[in-house]
Amino acid sequence: MDAFYASVEQRDDPQLRGKPVIVAWQGNRSVVCAASYEARSFGVHSAMPAMRVERLCPDAIFVPPDFTRYRAVSRSVREIFKRHTDLVEPLSLDEAYLDVTENKTGLATATLVARTIREQIRQELNLTASAGVAPNKFLAKLASDWRKPDGLFVIQPGDIDAFLLPLPVERLPGVGKVTGEKLAKLGAQTVRDLRTLDVPVLEQHFGRFGRRLHELALGIDHNQVVPDRPTQSISVEDTFERDVLLAETEPMIRRLTEKLWSASRKESRMARTVVLKLKTSEFKILTRSHTLGSPPSSCEELTDIVLKLRERVDLGPQQRYRLVGVGLSNFREPEGTAAQPVLFE
């Protein structure tokens, strides 16, 4: 979906159309959840501090996020997907992989399926989506970003090298700043350069990820589209209006834990690991986790566990924090909750 949250806001409020819309809570510590393309032309992007947005785009219109509404629209989009294939793997509210090797509507090509889905989204939901069509997930993801917004890009099997080889290595999934710098030292700044490096050399510098890099450079990705992927973790976090001492974090922890408990009730599987996340005023991130013999039975029990995790933070009484988060992970089926040792990490 194109600028999904901002596009929903513009769709539902005609006065916002054609204007630089920022979906974010306005405040000193707020960050951008989404920006309309009108705002992006000023250099605004997701996760940018809201204060910086006000400098880049003085006419920006801030709209508080409404995730209940976005989730409802996301469900409608997925209903359209399901008309064509049951092999839908959601990545987030606004993005998914679809395997249309065989499709329910009998359309002759994947390109025609993508074109039909985009038109149905436009007609029924008054929103736009961009699509990438390719032989595998990795290439389809790259293609989906190629002609945004409201675009369709197709990579035919015979065109993979022409598309892939000129790309900078940073376009490959998993290649961030550090990995990119390491590859540059090995003489690999483009995918074409990366292909010249032998697998043993890549494994020497990047371990198992070295072989993955080699495969990506060749356009190879054997990962399947996995529908209904089980939840791996749930988390919520928030940034304080001002940096606070550890002892002052309890009210926020209690509010976040209530949200987390409510979200966890929607899962059929049970979480066994509780996580506390903190970010210091110097932007250092630390976590504390606790794996239980049995899942928390109430919000109060979950809150107690998180507060006990806070006691294991030992950066000194004067250390200040700008963010706190709580999470659940290690989800298991209810019948698989046999007792196990308590683990601290």
Image: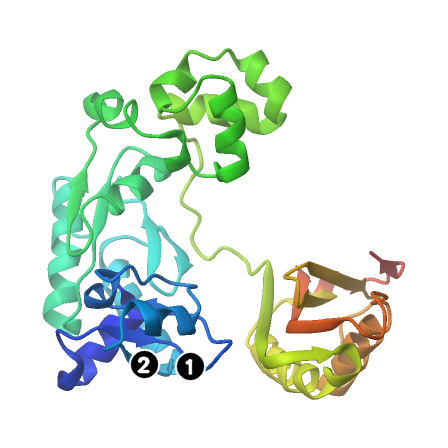
The answer to whether 267 appears left or right of 69 in the picture is: right
Question: Residue at left 41%, top 82%?
Answer: 26
Vertical arrangement, residue 26 with respect to residue 280, above or below: below
Across and down, in percent, residue 262 comes to 59, 82
Q: Residue 62 carries which label?
A: 2
Mark 2 to mark 1: distance in Å? 7 Å
Quadrant position of residue 45: bottom left
Residue 91 occupies which quadrant of the picture? bottom left
Residue 25, numbered circle: 1
State the residue at coordinates (86%, 73%).
311
Disc 1 is placed on an element classified as loop
Specify whether residue 103 is in view.
no
Amino acid type shown at disc 2: Phe
Against 329, residue 147 (above or below) is above
The residue at the point 67 percent across, 68 percent down is 270
Disc 2, SS:
strand
Nearer to us in this view, 180 or 128:
180
| The image quarter in which residue 218 lies | top left
Q: Position of residue 248 (x, y in %)?
A: 74, 85
Can residue 95 be seen by looking at this rendering?
A: yes
Q: How is the image coloured?
A: rainbow
Q: Going by the image, does 208 lie left or right of 161?
A: right
Type of amino acid under label 1? Trp
Location of the N terminus by quadrant is: bottom left
